[in-house]
Amino acid sequence: MVPTPYDLAALTLIISLIAGIIPLQRKFTNFIDLQRTTGIASGILIASALLIVIPEGFHIAGQEIGVGITTGGAVLAGFLFMLILEGTGIGHAVHEEHHDHTHSHGHEHVHHPESPIMAIIGLTIHAATDGLVIGAAASSASNGVTMLVLIAVLSHKFPTSLSVGAFSLHERGDRKLAFRDVLIFSLATPLMIIIAFTMMQDIEVFILGLMMLFSGGTFLYVATVDVLPDVHNPETGRSALVNVLLGATIMYGIILAAGDIGLH
């Protein structure tokens, strides 16, 4: 049975909600190694961008407009879009830093953007771009490509949702408000999957390819920015590198195991 876009949307919503609620339950928080989880997820996301999303986007768009500055520019646009959001304070980087912060707050340190609301908005926009690439893949690519993209998105969404829950609870100090933030973030991807799939039924095929390339650019930005602070840290650099390489290897293995999935 081939999953429908509604099935994909429901799955992303459930996983995101479960992960986001975990930090709201203190007894579970200590069991999550966020640094390792984020590193592995970043490796998976990088591999999926370079081995699945971007090549498939080039193939789809290239059939009509060729491979050149337009297709390459779509990847660049996705990367710069996330960079601009980050630079204007609507960032997604609320992953926990990994130094001791337990004495004063009872948990590791969390990045503190100037406005918690702006941080949640940035994360929600990023989550919407995840839905865009899944919706585009479901509209234009094979089922195999769609499922591989879904795996990559979900692998990264789990640690991101954990971070949203931890960050919101820390900043707001209220579990109800924190859950509201988690819910808003969790709804963004599934809603965009359905919207993107519905709207892309009647548009030119090359536009679908450009959208996948744009999303591939956002993947590259998010994955690298999430893990670079740990890579540059002398205390965590080696383990962070190992985690990223492990994630990339896992994704490469999944692609090989998937066999003929229609990649070109």
Image (cartoon, rainbow, N blue to C red):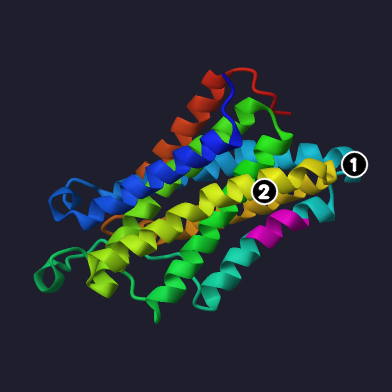
Task: Answer left or right for 102 relative to 19.
Answer: left
Examine the rendered structure and indicate whether residue 149 appears above or below residue 144: below
Would residue 239 be seen by someone viewing this image from the given angle? no
Provide the residue designation for mark 2.
Answer: 196
User: Which SS does the magenta portion mostly show?
Assistant: helix
- Quadrant containing the N terminus is top right
Q: Report helix, strand or loop for mark 1.
A: helix
Q: What's the mark number on residue 171?
A: none
Query: Is residue 83 covered in magenta?
Result: no
Of the two numbered discs 1 and 2 on the same chain, state the one appearing first in sequence. Answer: 1
Examine the rendered structure and indicate whether residue 100 appears above or below residue 141: below
| Residue that appears at 42% across and 75% down | 117
The amino acid beneath tag 2 is Ala
Task: State which region is magenta.
Answer: 73-78
**Of 239 and 251, the residue lying toward us:** 251
Q: What's the mark number on residue 64?
A: 1
**Crowd rating for badge 1 (residues with CA inside 10 Å; few <14, some 14–19, many 20+):** few
Would residue 182 be seen by someone viewing this image from the given angle? yes
| Residue that appears at 55% across and 32% down | 148
The percent position of residue 73, horizontal first and vertical second, equals 76, 58
Q: Report helix, strand or loop for mark 2.
A: helix
